[in-house]
Image: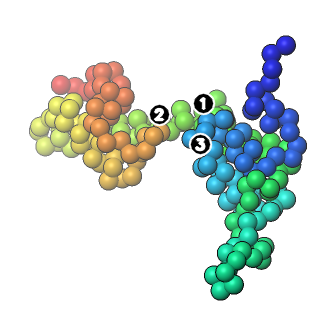
């Protein structure tokens, strides 16, 4: 029989500490555990996730020692979350994995959404240029579309697109857009 992994064991533990829940939320990726812990602490503070809260004592500079007034930061090692509550919370925030009504994932929707907007902006430039009796190159349209997307705040799945070659390759090149335009 194969031994359980750390994550498999944590999924069986009840209750979980915030630190353990952060490990599960980050999928065991060490570099993401701190961020996951901050998200959990914030959602516990805001009432989005039920937990038995234990707080760190605060340092009182006037007394010169730590005092426990009950309003310090959440202690991620002693604050506990019921496994059932964590599982419900986990399901509710699975970003980019949860399927929407069309059967595509949220990241696929963002991916196709920015490309569609890039083509619409390209159409605007192409129509304007045609009306003015001139045309730009594919590289020129890619650069202009990138600049316009940044001005409108349109982002790709990983944030601001700052390379016109990305626009060209993923949204405008070939049969995606440029091949359909009359020359």
List x then y, in percent, for residue 144.
Answer: 23, 43
Please determine whether, in this image, residue 123 is positioned above or below residue 45: above
Q: Which residue is mark 2?
A: 112
Q: Which residue is mark 3?
A: 32
Q: Secondary structure at mark 2?
A: helix
Residue in the image at 17% along x and 41% along y: 129
Mark with earlier residue (2, 1): 1
Disc nearest the viewer among 3 and 2: 3
Quadrant of residue 31 within the rendered picture: top right
Please determine whether, in this image, residue 62 is positioned above or below residue 180: below
The answer to whether residue 66 is left or right of residue 149 is right
Q: Which mark is residue 45?
A: none
Quadrant of residue 98 within the rendered picture: top right
Please determine whether, in this image, residue 51 is positioned above or below residue 160: below
List x then y, in percent, for residue 33.
Answer: 63, 44
Q: Marks 3/1: CA distance?
A: 25 Å
Disc nearest the viewer among 3 and 1: 3
Decide which of 128, 49 is in the foreground and name it. 49
Please determine whether, in this image, residue 21 is positioned above or below residue 46: above
Q: Secondary structure at mark 3?
A: helix
Is residue 84 something one can see in this rendering?
Answer: no
**Farthest residue in the left direction?**
133
List x then y, in percent, for residue 45.
Answer: 72, 64
Is residue 79 something one can see in this rendering?
Answer: yes
Q: Secondary structure at mark 1?
A: loop
Q: Are marks 2 and 1 in contact (CB under 8 Å)?
A: yes
Q: Which mark is residue 104?
A: 1
């Amino acid at each position: 029989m194969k031994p359980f992994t750390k994550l498999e064991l944590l999924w069986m533990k009840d209750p979980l500490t915030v630190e353990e829940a952060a490990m599960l939320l980050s999928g065991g990726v060490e570099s993401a555990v701190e961020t996951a812990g901050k998200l959990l602490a914030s959602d516990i503070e805001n009432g989005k996730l039920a937990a038995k809260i234990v707080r760190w004592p605060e340092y009182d500079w006037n007394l010169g020692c730590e005092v426990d007034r009950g309003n310090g930061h959440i202690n991620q090692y002693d604050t506990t979350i019921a496994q059932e509550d964590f599982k419900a919370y986990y399901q509710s925030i699975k970003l980019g994995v949860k399927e929407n009504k069309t059967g595509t994932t949220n990241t696929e929707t963002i991916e196709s959404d920015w490309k569609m907007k890039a083509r619409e902006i390209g159409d605007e430039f192409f129509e304007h240029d045609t009306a003015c009796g001139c045309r730009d190159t594919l590289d020129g349209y890619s650069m202009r579309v990138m600049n316009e997307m940044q001005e409108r705040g349109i982002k790709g799945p990983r944030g601001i697109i700052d390379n016109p070659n990305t626009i060209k390759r993923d949204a405008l090149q070939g049969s995606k857009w440029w091949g359909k335009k009359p020359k």
